[in-house]
Image (cartoon, rainbow, N blue to C red):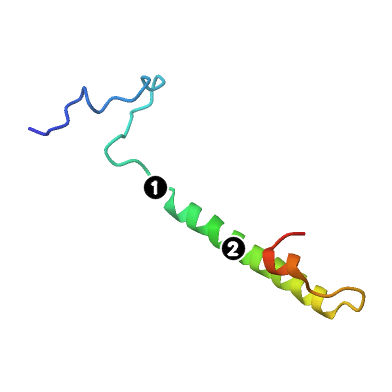
Amino acid sequence: MSVFTNRHMMGALPPPPGIIPNLVSPPSKRGGIFAVAAVSLSVSTICVGLRIATRSTNRFGSTGWDDCMGFQ
């Protein structure tokens, strides 16, 4: 007999009618979270690179402490 009984595997609220709860092996959202993190990291890296490239080649401005600290 398992340590966990039906009494221990109940959710906070009963499921809606027609839904069978799966508390032992719920579906994973790991792939979607990894994809969103990878896309966000890529976009932010491109944006920071473009900002630094623009600030360093602009004749009216130059890079300063705000570029090193990440402030705008």
Q: Secondary structure at mark 1?
A: loop
Q: Residues within 10 Å of mark 1 (few under 14, many from 20)?
A: few
Rendering quarter of residue 59: bottom right
Q: CB atoms at circles 1 and 2 under 8 Å apart?
A: no
Give the residue pinned by disc 1.
28
Residue at 33% across / 28% down in the picture? 20
Q: Residues within 10 Å of mark 2 (few under 14, many from 20)?
A: few
Rendering quarter of residue 17: top left
Q: On the rendered structure, is 65 left or right of 1?
A: right
Residue at 36% across / 22% down in the picture? 12
Residue at 73% across / 59% down in the picture? 71
For the C terminus, the quadrant is: bottom right
- Above or below, 64 relative to 2: below
Indicate the amino acid at tag 2.
Leu
Q: Secondary structure at mark 2?
A: helix
Q: Which mark is residue 41?
A: 2
Residue at 33% across / 25% down in the picture? 11
Report, in whole angstroms, how far the alpha carbon at label 1 lies from the one at label 2.
Answer: 22 Å
Of 17 and 41, which appears nearest the observer? 41
Q: Which mark is residue 63?
A: none
Whole-percent x, y for residue 2 in the image? 11, 34
Of 1 and 68, which appears nearest the observer? 68
- Above or below, 46 relative to 8: below
For the N terminus, the quadrant is: top left
Whole-percent x, y for residue 5 in the image? 16, 27
Rendering quarter of residue 42: bottom right
Indicate the amino acid at tag 1.
Ser
Number of numbered discs: 2
Whole-percent x, y for residue 63 in the image? 79, 74
Q: Of the residues under marks 1 and 2, which one precedes in the sequence?
A: 1
Q: Check the image and name the residue furthest to the left.
A: 1
